[in-house]
Every structure is written in structure tokens, then in C-alpha cells.
């Protein structure tokens, strides 16, 4: 701080000293007797010398003041410039509010300038650090820097915050890109393992840095695009190989099924057949789609194809037996042309392609199985009906036995069976009615007749009902004939008396023969029992095939197993009755 009192004292002391010296000089001049003019001249010289000294001092002081003012101005300008560079608002310092000397002001400004310079340098270092990071991340991501440099003209916090924000964005982008590349590399590794491709060579061809586990990876868009393109290409290859392997697996399954390949051989390719319906992400086992493995499967398929060509004829004959078995069980008759086409001679001749025959016979088997499923309910009812007819036949034979009540041991068991057979025989009309209704509904639904062992089932049911009616009429005729015999015997006894005679004993044989002729009736139940088959026959019939529905079945045949009496049989009965009357009259 400038001290005015101190300076005033100094100036007073200088004036006092000068006055004392001037007084002493005047005294000396008086003693010397100097003239007044000389004295004035000397005083003037002294005054000029003092003025000159003061002038020089003033000039030097002014120069120093000017220099200090310039320095202060420069320092202030530098401070304002640094504040502008740092983005700070001009702030009036506390020193400027208090009046101080230029030197003190300059010293204060010098200290302030030093502080601002240090602050600017620290800020510049922050900028340099951030920019270096930006350039590094930008180079990793884009392959080049974004042209960011620290020019020193703008070191504001706003710009630094912008750089930090940009750096954060780039670091997030880098993190995302790194994650994306890692995912792509993992996908590529998985695809290469499944396809049996060298993974390291693949990623090295895309970019060498991807094969370096220690160093940084290239994160540029070009590398990501190459990775994506390679993954897409390998996925297309995977899908193509999947389709090829799926086709091979399907062929293998067909060949195995065709040739009844043992399970031990099938298990060797279980990992192939189990992936027939698998989707693309489900196949991840190593080398599952490698060319070596696919070639191995293809070789197996070709081997089976060769075996198939040598065994296909045997398979056709085997399928033919299967078709005949199904037809026999379902009482269908194989068409004549189909039986000839699938015969051993036709297959061995090679006229028809064995593979075409195999496909056709498999199609026929599928059709027959479907037909058999729709016939099952009716066939079950037919089976019950035939069993009931068998019981009815047995019951008729049992009733014709005159000694049926004279059996010894076991007679009660026979009686029990006869009672059960009678109950079952009484159910036959209801069975026939239900079977007829069911068969008619089946034929209406499918638009084709229902054939059973080559004949129409409805025709056989109608024949059964017709035979049943004829049987009832025959029973009535037998009862009438018996009444006539009793009446004839009564008239003979009335005419000739009841005395026994040798001729009367002869009537018994005649009556017995008559009874045999009359009782030679058809056993209806027996007529409905099919003959035992000498072997398996194919029962699948062509609905358009004409012929007697009774032929080839061995039952429901008129006159079979005794049959109904013919017209000549009826005449024979009448002639026998007349002959008996003549004999009785002659004896009488």
C-alpha cells in the first residue's frame, strides 16, 4: 500500500537538507565575497542540476509505471483469455475493489495468471486424455479417428462434457459391438462344430484379430458384416445338409421297415433317424452334419439299396402272405388278377417291376386293413351267428336220436348242453335281424355289397330265412304224415282187428323205413357251419364278380349234409303210404 505520510516526511527531510546546504553555501559565498551575479548563476546551475536529476527520476519512474501498467494489462488480458478458453465468466477480483499500488496489483495479477495457467494446463490434460480415449475407441470401432484434436482455443467444461458424453457413447457402442462379435463368434463356432469345419481357420480368414484370445478384437462394421455373412452362409449350408440327412434318414427308415432290419443295426444310426423332425436349432451335436458323417450315412443307404434290390422279390411274396392273412381273417377274397399279379411265378418272371409290385401290394394292404376295420363289428356278429347255428345243428341231431334219454353216465351233462343250445337257437332270429340291419347300413354307407367268403352276406341271410321257413313247412308236413299213418293204422285195426299176425311184425320195418325217408330232413344249423378249410385262402372279393354265392363257402348250400327233400322225395313218401295200405288190405 502506498504510504503518503512516509513520502511527505522524506520530501520534507530532503527540502530541509537542501535548505541547510543552500544556507551553508550562502555563508561560504559570503565569506568568499562572491558577487551576487555569481551567486545567482551558481544557484541557477544547482537548480538546473536538481531539476535534471528529478526529471530523469520522473522519466524513469514514468517508464517503470508504464511498464507495470502494460504488464498489468497483459496479465489481465491473459487472465481474461484463459477464462474465455476455460469457458468462465469474467469475475472481478477482490483486489480490484481495494486501491493498491501498481506493483502490488502486478504481483497479485502475476500470481493469478500463474493459477490460471495451471488451471488451463490441467484442463488441457483432461482434454488430451479424453480425446486420446476417443481416438482409440473410434479407431477400434471405425478403423480411423474422428478428427478430434485439442487446439487450446476451447477448453470449456461444456466441450469437455460433450467429449465425455461422446466417449461414453462410443464405449457403449464398443461394448455392444464386442458382445455382438462374441455372440457371432460363438454362433460361428457352434455351426463349425456341427458342420465339421475348421473354426479357427474360418475366423482367421474373416479377421486375424478374432483368432487372438489375448489381444483386442477388431470391432469395425466390416468385420461384423463378414461375421454375419459367414454365419448366414453356414446356416444355409446347415439347412441344406439337414435336408439331405433328413432325406437319407427317411430312406433308411423305409428300407429298414421294408427289409425288417434288426434293431442292433438300426441303433447305429439312431442319432440320424431321431433328427428327422428336428428343427435347425435342435441340431447342435458336433459333426452331426459333417460331410464325412453324411457320406457315411449315404454309404449305408446305398448298401441297403443294393440289399433291397436282391430281397425285394422275397419282400413282395412276404407282403402277399400278409395280404392273404388279413383277407383270410376278415373273410374277404383276393381278386383273381391281383392274386395272379402277386403270385410267385409273376414275381420271379420279372415282367412287373418288383418295386412297383411292392408299392402296389402295400397300398392293397392298407386298403384291406381299412376295410377290415369297418367290417369288424359285422364279422363279430356273423361269428356269433355261426356259433349259434352250430348249436342249432347239434340240437337237431340230438333231437333225432331216439335213445337220447337212455344214456347212462353223463346224461345230465348232455341235457344241460341241449338246454343251452335251445336257448341259443331261440336267439338266432334276433341275431339274423340285427345282422341284416347292420349289413344294410354298412352297404348304404359305403355303396357296395358286403361280401363274406366270396358271397353276399345279405343273400346268405335271405337263404337262411328261406330255409328256415321251408324247415317249418317240412315239420308241418311231417306232423300231417304222422297223423295219416296213425289214421291208416286205426282203419286197418278196425277192418282186420287188432290180433297180431306175422305180417304185422313186418309193418315195423316199413314204418321205420318210412320214418327214415321222412326224417331225412335238412339239418338247418348244420347247413350253416362252414367246412373246415384245408388251408388259408384269400377272402377279398371283387364286388362285381358274378357267381353262385353258395359256391366255395361250404355252407348254406341247398341239400348239403342231408338237405331238404326234393319233389321226387315227396312223391316217394306218398307212394310208400299207398303201398302200405295195399299190403294191409291184402293181408286182411
Image (cartoon, rainbow, N blue to C red):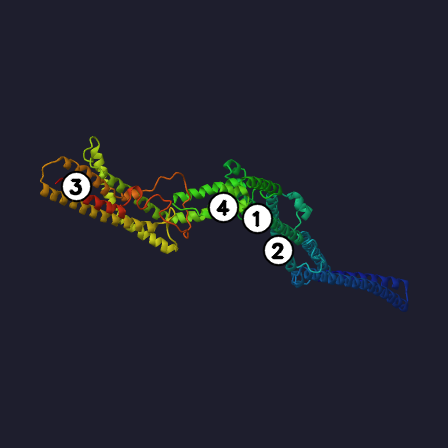
Cα distance, mark 4 to mark 2?
Answer: 80 Å
Cα gap from disc 4 to disc 1, whole angstroms? 37 Å
Going from N to C along the chain, the mark reached first, 3 or 1, is 1
Front: mark 2 or 1: 1
- Residue 430 vs residue 553, the one in the foreground: 553
Q: Nearer the viewer, mark 4 or mark 3?
A: 3
- Residue 37 in the image: state x and y as whole percent: 90, 69
Q: CA distance from mark 2 to mark 1?
A: 44 Å
User: Residue 308 or 396: which is nearer the viewer?
Assistant: 396
Residue 562's spot in the image, x, y percent? 28, 42
* Residue 183 appears anywhere in the view: no
Between disc 4 and disc 3, whose residue precedes?
4
Left or right of 85: which side holds 266?
Answer: left
Q: Residues within 10 Å of mark 1 (few under 14, many from 20)?
A: few
Q: Earlier along the polypeptide chain: callout 4 or callout 1?
A: 1
The answer for how far apart the CA atoms under marks 2 and 3 are is 138 Å
Mark sitting on residue 341: 4
Inter-mark Cα distance, 3 to 1:
100 Å
Mark in the foreground, 4 or 2: 4
- At mark 4, the secondary structure is helix
Q: Position of residue 130 (x, y in %)?
A: 66, 53
Residue denoted by label 1: 243
| Element carrying mark 1 | helix
Q: Quadrant of residue 286?
A: top right
Whole-percent x and y of residue 282?
Answer: 53, 46
Decide which of tag 2 and tag 1 comes sooner along the chain: 2
Res 169 label: 2
Whether residues under marks 4 and 1 lie with C-beta atoms below 8 angstroms apart, the answer is no
Sooner in the amino-acid sequence: mark 4 or mark 2: 2
Residue ID for mark 3: 583
Amino acid at each position: 500500500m502506498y504510504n503518503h505520510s512516509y513520502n511527505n516526511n522524506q520530501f520534507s527531510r530532503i527540502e530541509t537538507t537542501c535548505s541547510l546546504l543552500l544556507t551553508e553555501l550562502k555563508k561560504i559565498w559570503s565569506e568568499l565575497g562572491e558577487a551576487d551575479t555569481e551567486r545567482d548563476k551558481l544557484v541557477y546551475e544547482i537548480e538546473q542540476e536538481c531539476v535534471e536529476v528529478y526529471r530523469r527520476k520522473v522519466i524513469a519512474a514514468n517508464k517503470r509505471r508504464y511498464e507495470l501498467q502494460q504488464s498489468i494489462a497483459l496479465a489481465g488480458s491473459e487472465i481474461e483469455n484463459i477464462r474465455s478458453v476455460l469457458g468462465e465468466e469474467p469475475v472481478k477480483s477482490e483486489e480490484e475493489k481495494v486501491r493498491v499500488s501498481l506493483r502490488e496489483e502486478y504481483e497479485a495479477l502475476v500470481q493469478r495468471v500463474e493459477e490460471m495457467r495451471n488451471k488451463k494446463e490441467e484442463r488441457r490434460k483432461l482434454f488430451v486424455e479424453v480425446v486420446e480415449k476417443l481416438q482409440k475407441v473410434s479407431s477400434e470401432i471405425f478403423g480411423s479417428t474422428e478428427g478430434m484434436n485439442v487446439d487450446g482455443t476451447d477448453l470449456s467444461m461444456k466441450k469437455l462434457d460433450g467429449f465425455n458424453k461422446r466417449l461414453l457413447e462410443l464405449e457403449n457402442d464398443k461394448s455392444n459391438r464386442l458382445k455382438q462379435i462374441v455372440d457371432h463368434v460363438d454362433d460361428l463356432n457352434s455351426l463349425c462344430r456341427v458342420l465339421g469345419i475348421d473354426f479357427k481357420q474360418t475366423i482367421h480368414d474373416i479377421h486375424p484379430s478374432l483368432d487372438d484370445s489375448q489381444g483386442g478384437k477388431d470391432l469395425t462394421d466390416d468385420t461384423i458384416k463378414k461375421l454375419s455373412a459367414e454365419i448366414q452362409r453356414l446356416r444355409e449350408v446347415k439347412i441344406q445338409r439337414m435336408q439331405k440327412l433328413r432325406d437319407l434318414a427317411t430312406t433308411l427308415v423305409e428300407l429298414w421297415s421294408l427289409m425288417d432290419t434288426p434293431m442292433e443295426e438300426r441303433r447305429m444310426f439312431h442319432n440320424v433317424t431321431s433328427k428327422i423332425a428336428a428343427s435347425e436349432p435342435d441340431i447342435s451335436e458336433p459333426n452331426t452334419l459333417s460331410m464325412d458323417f453324411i457320406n457315411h450315412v449315404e454309404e449305408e443307404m446305398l448298401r441297403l439299396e443294393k440289399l433291397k434290390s436282391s430281397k425285394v422279390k422275397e419282400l413282395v411274396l412276404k407282403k402277399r402272405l400278409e395280404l392273404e392273412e388279413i383277407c383270410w381273417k376278415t373273410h374277404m377274397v383276393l381278386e383273381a388278377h391281383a392274386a395272379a399279379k402277386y403270385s410267385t411265378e409273376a414275381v420271379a418272371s420279372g415282367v412287373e417291376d418288383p418295386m412297383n409290385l411292392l408299392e402296389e401290394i402295400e397300398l392293397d394292404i392298407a386298403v384291406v386293413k381299412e376295410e377290415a376295420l369297418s367290417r369288424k363289428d359285422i364279422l363279430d356278429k356273423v361269428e356269433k351267428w355261426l356259433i349259434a347255428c352250430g348249436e342249432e345243428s347239434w340240437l337237431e341231431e340230438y333231437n333225432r336220436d331216439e335213445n337220447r334219454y337212455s344214456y347212462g353216465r353223463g346224461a345230465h351233462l348232455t341235457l344241460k348242453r341241449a338246454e343251452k343250445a335251445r336257448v341259443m337257437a331261440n336267439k338266432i332270429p334276433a341275431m339274423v335281424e340285427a345282422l341284416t340291419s347292420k349289413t344294410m347300413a354298412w352297404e348304404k354307407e359305403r355303396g357296395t355289397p358286403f361280401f363274406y367268403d366270396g358271397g353276399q352276406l345279405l343273400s346268405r341271410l335271405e337263404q337262411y330265412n328261406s330255409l328256415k321257413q321251408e324247415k317249418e313247412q317240412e315239420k308241418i308236413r311231417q306232423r300231417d304224415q304222422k297223423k295219416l299213418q296213425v289214421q291208416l293204422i286205426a282203419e286197418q285195426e278196425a277192418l282186420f282187428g287188432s290180433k297180431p299176425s306175422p305180417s304185422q311184425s313186418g309193418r315195423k320195418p316199413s314204418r321205420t323205413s318210412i320214418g327214415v325217408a321222412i326224417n331225412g330232413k335238412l339239418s338247418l344249423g348244420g347247413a350253416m357251419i362252414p367246412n373246415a378249410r384245408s388251408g388259408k385262402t384269400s377272402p377279398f372279393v371283387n364286388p362285381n364278380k358274378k357267381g353262385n354265392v353258395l359256391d366255395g363257402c361250404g355252407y348254406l348250400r341247398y341239400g348239403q349234409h342231408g338237405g331238404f327233400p326234393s319233389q321226387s322225395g315227396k312223391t316217394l313218401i306218398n307212394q310208400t303210404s299207398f303201398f302200405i295200405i295195399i299190403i294191409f288190405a291184402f293181408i286182411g
